[in-house]
């Protein structure tokens, strides 16, 4: 493992810290115990809230969201969906990240509390994202889409649904280590099948919970956007990938496919990074590089929108 994944000392400490919240005893207890462990883990990484933000919870088209509003005028809204394998996470789990984006980039961030599987499998989470997107468009807001992991999957699928329903195109999409293709369908799924914090086995578990049986035998771009017949006319994109991640090919091939179909897309791979490293921001150089890259892109699109 050490030779295959030569992590920096700080990244190795992050991985070990995350793993410490998920011993076999927790895994074997099932989803409720895993959610509690995930909430405890993410809370342990949380940073102090920025006093320069106005933070409020609100319903948008019946969906719970949290708004991070810098004091003063802003002209860009980021619509964010959290990761967690479609079955973990909440408004609280990525609260610090959303606040940091709002503060550092001086943008309004709308974070969505989409319904989780297996209680609410596909397409519930996507429907929630679409409902919030509709609400923002109806308010005259053309958002910048941002998501990590499962949340990035939902945002990519959202762009397809919005296009097909002829809704206003998003300003752009920034996807952080997205899941976009069926399990074991790409070479990196197998090359990094035992990668830190996201193995092939854990990815299969996530998808088993997310995808109802009736969808498991057919192609569906709303589940796996790389299966889409066309990616034309989608928002311009920046796809950020972690080097040691089974999903690295998802990111690379999505960016490549967008470019081939006339959509401006940039692929950025962060060396030494592992999946889920948003929570390492502030404690690990590689995660800080990721955060800086995200902020650079948000700022770039913010300037473009102005």
Image (tube, rainbow, N blue to C red):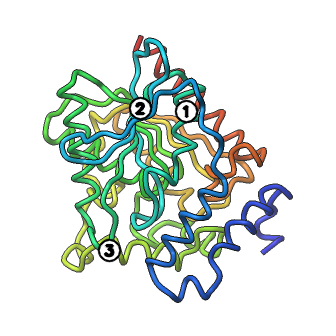
- The residue to which callout 2 is attached is 78
Q: Give the secondary structure at mark 2.
A: strand
Say if 173 sits above or below 3 in the image: above
Q: Give the secondary structure at mark 3.
A: loop
- Which residue does the image show at 53% across and 89% down from the upper left? 28
- Where in the figure is residue 110, as x and y percent of width and height? 38, 36
All told, the count of numbered labels is 3
Q: CA distance from mark 2 to mark 1?
A: 9 Å
- Where in the figure is residue 187, as x and y percent of width and height? 54, 67
The crowd level at tag 1 (other Cα within 10 Å; few <14, some 14-19, many 20+) is many
Image mark for residue 101 = 1
Q: Is residue 135 left or right of residue 40?
A: left
- Which residue does the image show at 41% across and 41% down from the upper left? 80
Q: CA distance from mark 1 to mark 3?
A: 30 Å
Q: Give the secondary structure at mark 1.
A: helix
Which of the 4 quarters of the picture holds residue 2? bottom right
Q: Is residue 42 left or right of residue 161?
A: right
- The residue to which callout 3 is attached is 118
């Amino acid at each position: 493992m050490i030779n295959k994944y030569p992590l920096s000392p700080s990244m190795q400490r992050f991985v070990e810290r995350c793993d410490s919240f998920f011993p076999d005893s927790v895994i074997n207890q099932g989803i409720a115990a895993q959610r509690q462990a995930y909430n405890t883990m993410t809370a342990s990484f949380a940073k102090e809230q920025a006093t320069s933000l106005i933070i409020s919870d609100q319903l948008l088209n019946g969906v719970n969201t949290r708004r991070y509003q810098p004091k003063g005028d802003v002209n860009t809204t980021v619509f964010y969906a959290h990761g967690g394998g479609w079955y973990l996470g909440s408004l609280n789990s990525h609260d610090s990240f959303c606040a940091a984006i709002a503060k550092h980039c001086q943008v309004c961030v709308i974070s969505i509390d989409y319904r989780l599987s297996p209680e609410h499998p596909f397409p519930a989470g996507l429907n929630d994202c679409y409902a919030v997107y509709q609400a923002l468009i109806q308010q005259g807001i053309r958002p910048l889409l941002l998501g990590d992991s499962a949340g990035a999957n939902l945002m990519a699928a959202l762009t397809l649904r919005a296009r097909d329903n002829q809704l206003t195109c998003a300003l752009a999409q920034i996807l952080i280590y997205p899941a976009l293709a069926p399990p074991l369908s790409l070479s990196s799924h197998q090359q990094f099948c035992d990668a830190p914090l996201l193995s092939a086995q854990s990815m299969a578990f996530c998808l088993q919970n997310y995808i109802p049986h009736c969808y498991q035998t057919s192609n569906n771009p709303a589940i796996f956007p790389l299966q889409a017949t066309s990616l034309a006319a989608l928002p311009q994109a920046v796809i950020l990938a972690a080097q040691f991640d089974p999903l690295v090919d998802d990111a690379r091939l999505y960016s490549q496919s967008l470019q081939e179909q006339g959509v401006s897309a940039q692929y950025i791979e962060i060396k030494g990074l592992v999946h889920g490293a948003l929570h390492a921001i502030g404690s690990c150089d590689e995660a800080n590089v990721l955060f800086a890259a995200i902020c650079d892109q948000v700022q770039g699109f913010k300037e473009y929108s102005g």
